[in-house]
Image: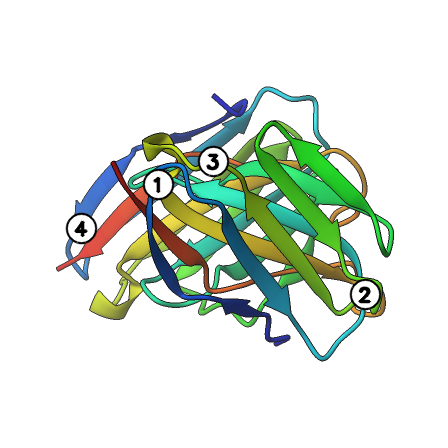
Amino acid sequence: ETGVTQTPRHLVMGMTNKKSLKCEQHLGHNAMYWYKQSAKKPLELMFVYNFKEQTENNSVPSRFSPECPNSSHLFLHLHTLQPEDSALYLCASSQGPAGSYEQYFGPGTRLTVT
Amino acid sequence: GQQLNQSPQSMFIQEGEDVSMNCTSSSIFNTWLWYKQDPGEGPVLLIALYKAGELTSNGRLTAQFGITRKDSFLNISASIPSDVGIYFCAGQLIDTGNQFYFGTGTSLTVIP
């Protein structure tokens, strides 16, 4: 138990669906992150939020839309996804200014796009 | 993005053997992290390193921050079956907004 929870753990969706991934951290951290993990590839940073403000968007397609209502919660809204978006989506949080401290990960959401 | 070369890609060892893996880059890093990921779970932080030459242990695990600041090493002594998993290195660059970059992982199999 790392103090970062993610729901759902598994999600299967069609290309025309709209769904949301949720992340919550119980560590009192100020920065939160979304990563994409595909087989045989390094973790890909998608979005960074620092004190609820988005500070990084690594050229992520607009079909992925993040939302950070407060420092403890992070959402990833999904719509009109493609099969190549199937992957493990990981949320992480860190203590200090984004990127300055070690990151703690949630268990991930395994997403399958059909 | 930055490339971290992690090796070996996979290892098959007998229980009780020691394990060594490393991460190298052409860039200079100011922080190195080592994570372990079990199937179906997120990466769990094992060791964090902040200074060149630093050697840090966590139980049977020992990691070192290379003196060139371009590499890091992880050793596991007397491996046990629960060491099975994928081990990732992550490096934080000084001059790119402190973003972390991740290696492709070393898959460890321990044969009882």
Q: Quadrant of the C terminus of chain A?
A: bottom left
Total number of numbered labels?
A: 4
What residue would you read off at disc 4? Answer: A13
Q: Is residue B105 left or right of residue A95?
A: left
State the CA–CA distance, disc 3 to disc 4: 44 Å
Going by the numbered disc 4, the residue's amino acid type is Met
Return the chain for callout 4. A
Q: Amino acid at mark 1?
A: Val
User: Does residue A11 sit above or below A39 in this rendering?
Assistant: above
Residue picked out by circle 2: B69
Q: Secondary structure at mark 1?
A: loop
Q: Secondary structure at mark 4?
A: strand
Task: Report the residue marked by disc 3.
Answer: B78
Mark 1 and mark 2 lie on one chain; the one further toward the N terminus is 2
Q: Residues within 10 Å of mark 4 (few under 14, many from 20)?
A: some
- Left or right: A32, with A83 as reference point: right
- The crowd level at tag 2 (other Cα within 10 Å; few <14, some 14-19, many 20+) is many
Can you identify the residue that label 1 sits on? Answer: B84
